[in-house]
Amino acid sequence: MSTILDAKIPSGAIGEKWTKFKSSVPLVNPANKRNIEVIVVGTGLAGASAAASLAELGYKVKAFCFQDSPRRAHSIAAQGGINAAKNYQNDGDSTYRLFYDTIKGGDYRAREANVHRLAEVSGSIIDQCVAQGVPFAREYGGLLSNRSFGGTQVQRTFYAAGQTGQQLLLGAYSALQRQVGLGNVTMMTRHEMMDVVMIDGKARGIIARDLISGKLERHFGHAVLLCTGGYGNVFYLSTNAMGSNVTAAWKAHRKGAFFANPCYTQIHPTCIPVSGDHQSKLTLMSESLRNDGRIWVPKKQNDNRPAVQIPEDERDYYLERRYPAFGNLVPRDIASRAAKERCDAGYGVGTSKMAVYLDYAEAILRYGKGEANKKGIQNASDEELQAMGKAVVKEKYGNLFDMYKQITGEDPYSVPMRIYPAVHYTMGGLWVDYNLMTTVPGLYALGEANFSDHGANRLGASALMQGLADGYFVLPYTIGAYLAGDIRTKAIPTDAPEFVEAEKAVQARIDQLMNIKGTKSVDYFHKKLGKIMWNECGMSRSEAGLKGAITEIQGLIKEFWSDVRIPGDADEFNPELEKAGRVADFLELGELMCIDALNRNESCGGHFREEFQTEDGEALRDDENYAYVAAWEFKEQSKFELHKEELVYENIKIAQRSYK
Amino acid sequence: MNLSLKVWRQKNANSEGKFQQYDVQGISEDMSFLEMFDVLNERLINEGESPVAFDHDCREGICGMCSMYINGEPHGPNKGVTTCQLHMRSFKSGDTITVEPWRAKAFPIVKDLAVNRSAFDRIIAAGGYVSVNTGNAQDANSLPIPKDNADDAFMAAACIGCGACVAACKNASAMLFTSAKISQLALLPQGQAERTMRAEKMVAQMDVEGFGACTNTGACEAECPKGISLENIARMNREYYGAVLSSK
């Protein structure tokens, strides 16, 4: 029987919940903190900020990452920016507006209380980062600069060129390394979490594998935080790093943590198109480029002329045409579907015809004129304007333009970029309550690994905000509610039977994988899974397609476990074995994503079911029957039970989402 | 394209290594250098051989995980590019390409082309931060910073910690890496309080790790995929001498 989930949302008005919570949450005194150990898995924005903040508070922290340094976590690749309701631009921004935009952007499928808290702490994140020395972009007066992102009509995005994620992560990393140097954090690099250890129904530690020696290790913690990112790599091709994986979250899921809204995935509209079968990953071109760039396709089908030869009146700026209020800055789900629609209808460009243009010609000219005015140059020639304009664009987006050129061999300053949507982010994740605790006591999920703040579609520049909010300003408070009741628990020795059993199970699975000695590489299975997911559970989904995908994936799981080939040994540095373990978990997750997508008989945000659309092709929600979080409980292989958290909107009127 | 690869193979930190030759066929010029290695590894796995271990993660030039010393240059022949962003159109069919790991005493080999760069983390842990606990910050705009200073700090902060500077240097010096962090924080008002201590501690840690000294050849700057400037080393030297002279 399914249960109604209790999100433990504090009572009171939306604007007072968090303040009230903070002043009433139980505290742990400093002497007790010294005896409490916390395990943090993952060192991206959420993990690094949580590990550093908890260590500053006096907890004993052990942090883990699979990369060779915590600084390499995939948060580093975030480009465009981080939102905060500072209203520095005096353009009418407020906590409420950020809250409202995020709920609306998420297509009314996010939890109000969490999102409001996120908007409330957003300003403190910018303060904290600046204090750490994060070099945000500034104006000549020395104050911070802002830009716009999709789904908003204010400028609230703070940025550091196209490297905002890098600079924020290095800030959190330096705070973390400071605590490592002070001896408050033990940092375990090149370690992968293999399972959660449960004792008396609580998460009490993990089994980790030292990726260099292959040895399994047991680690105790009073609480375990999973800050392990999203699962976009289930599609094989995505903008995620090669190592990004679902394994930690999936192991937690198999140990009782519910997985919420797995089918909510974000397909980002502006990525460099696939160039061939060899492709190993896709590269994002930041959403910030839509601030200045204009997106178009030819008005004629199968138009093979080079872009610069297509005259203005033969171009279809389809986003500006369909969505005049937001134009090129509509949210990601809408921009992606619109690109797919044009390409499917035969208007795509490039050799594959699966691309649209992102054009900077007009912006370059506009900036050139602006510079000419500033410098008092009259009658500047076209070349002079172009040169000055290109310099401005270079300062704003230079690294992105360089990256485009390196990958495609084309110069985006002179020809428009070709772009196409690609998998980028996953809004679904482990179900958490207001305290960020999963359904397993003592097990928390932060950042992209949880599900709570972005509903069915995340707005640009909000992932960085959420990761740092969770790690710096939310979890360090909410964890007190659990740990205050745990001060009498002494560290549990890792020779306890539960640790021994958990390690044995992990070893058995590794042995099983190594002993298959089949004929096909891990990548063979990963690519096959990716194709199924992209075709049937990607930008558009249908009942028939999803049912077929589930059968196909079940077949693929059987084939994997009987025919995968992993070279080398388990007791050495063996990247193929690492990949095999991750792909085995992706296969099971892929099945659950399709089950979830099939269950949700509506279209919302990134989840678009062909059967449910308006006459003009927009997503058609069903608020009466589906205004809930679908949280799945693992029963056994291929069997999941649905639990619901009803979404209640007390502060925002639920409405048809329109950006027209 | 058809290529000949001479790749350094070494089972682990304690074993002897050697070059092994592999011929690869049918390489597309749109592939990245790492995708070319994916093709080779897929073949080796199918032939029952051990694939070449190499570090990589984001494959978009920002995580700093990929390495590879290609034809005598860290990250290969192109300027301002990491190995993952190096594409095969920079080579021609028939080329022989030699691929080695980063070589430095402070970067022990893990396997084949993968090395251990934890020494960099320890240098940062020695002082590459501003000591500001979460919650202590003042309003971000209460501290105006001239745009030029902010821009210069950003340029220094662009370092991805890949270690190409060390690999390029005949002394395996980590001066460019260390100076980039010292510069970033020395250029900003937030970094002033700990300025002296930072320079002393980070330089001391650099020496403990076994990195060599700087002899001003500039190879690090030439090979840095992020264009970190030698000026940072000059600034670090000023910071360090200032710190030593005023040390209490």
Image (cartoon, helix red, strand yellow):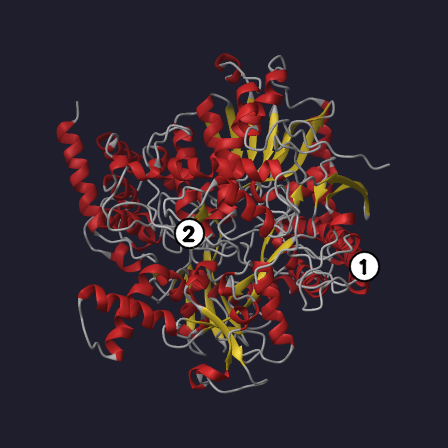
Q: How many labels does the image show?
A: 2
Residue A660's mark? none
Image x and y of residue A144, in percent:
33, 46
Task: Identify the chain of the residue marked 2, using the numbered disc in the image.
Answer: A
For image coordinates 81% across by 34% down, the residue present is: A3
Along the line of sight, the residue nearer the viewer: A572 or A492: A492
What SS does tag 1 mark? helix
For image coordinates 64% across by 19% down, the residue present is: A492
Residue A155's mark? 2
> Pointers 1 and 2 in contact (CB under 8 A)?
no
As drawn, is A419 to the left or to the right of B140?
Answer: right
Residue A354 seen by the camera: yes
As drawn, is B73 to the left or to the right of B194?
Answer: right
Gap between marks 1 and 2 measured at Cα:
49 Å
Q: Which of marks 1 and 2 is nearer the N terminus?
A: 2
> In the rendered image, which quarter is residue A14 located in?
top right
Position of the C terminus of chain B, as image quadrant, is top left
What kind of residue is marked 1?
Answer: Gly
Image x and y of residue B220, in percent:
27, 54
Along the line of sight, the residue nearer the viewer: A227 or B140: B140
What kind of residue is marked 2?
Answer: Gln
Image x and y of residue A159, in percent:
39, 50
As drawn, is B176 to the left or to the right of A310?
Answer: left
- Read off the residue under disc 1: A555
What SS does tag 2 mark? loop
> In the rendered image, which quarter is residue B70 located in?
bottom left
Q: Which mark is in front, 1 or 2?
A: 2
Task: Identify the chain of the residue marked 1, using the numbered disc in the image.
Answer: A
Q: Which residue lies furthest to the left in this view?
A: B245
> In the rendered image, which quarter is residue A450 located in?
top right
- Name above or below for residue A239 compared with residue A108: below
- Name above or below for residue A99 compared with residue B198: below
